[in-house]
Image (cartoon, helix red, strand yellow):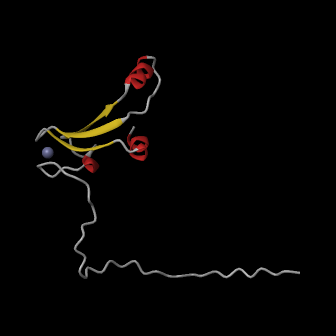
Amino acid sequence: MTEVAKEKTDETTSQEDSTSGSSEQESKLPSCACGHTREDLGKSVDVSMRNDYNLIGWALIVFGITARPINVKWYCSRCSQVIDETSDPDDLYRYS
Ligand SMILES: [Zn+2]
């Protein structure tokens, strides 16, 4: 007869942010000249997103099938800079 003792470790971690020597910024998102990040998409009218598809992707779109882009870019129309771009599959899944 084996008795399994389940120990619950309730660690109450206090998540109070103490600003003691934290030199690293929270958001490492790249920004354009006027300070927009890709998080500003939908918040600022200056930020727009463009999806790049490969040839198969375009063919699928022509047939009305949703294709996943191979590359996503964020543009700022105010300073006409590319804020950020990604070809990371996780990011593409999130933003496509
Ligand atoms: Zn800008």
Badge count? 0
**Residue 75 at x, y = what percent?**
21, 39
Q: Quick check: 4 left or right of 35?
A: right
- The image shows residue 31, relative to residue 81, as above or below, that is below
Position in image of residue 60 (x %, y %)? 45, 21
Q: Nearer the viewer, residue 2 or 35?
A: 2
Q: Look at 30% across and 81% down and name the residue there.
A: 18
Give residue 73's quadrant in the image: top left
Q: Residue furthest right?
A: 1
Compared with 93, 17 (above or below) is: below
Choose between 87 and 63: the one closer to the eye.
87
On the rendering, which quadrant does ligand 1 occupy? top left
Q: Residue furthest top?
A: 63
* Lateral position of residue 62 relative to residue 41, left or right: right
- The residue depicted at 44 percent of the width and 29 percent of the height is 67
Question: Picture coordinates of residue 52 (x, y %)?
Answer: 32, 31
Q: Where residue 2 sits in the image (x, y, percent)? A: 84, 80
83 on left or right of 54 = left
Query: Image height check: is 7 above or below 91?
Result: below
Q: Is residue 95 left or right of residue 76?
A: right
Please identify the quadrant where the N terminus is shown: bottom right
* Residue at the (22%, 52%) spot, across then down: 30
The quadrant in which residue 15 appears is bottom left
The image quadrant where one finds the C terminus is: top left
In the figure, residue 55 lies in which quadrant? top left
Name which residue lies at 77% across and 79% down.
4
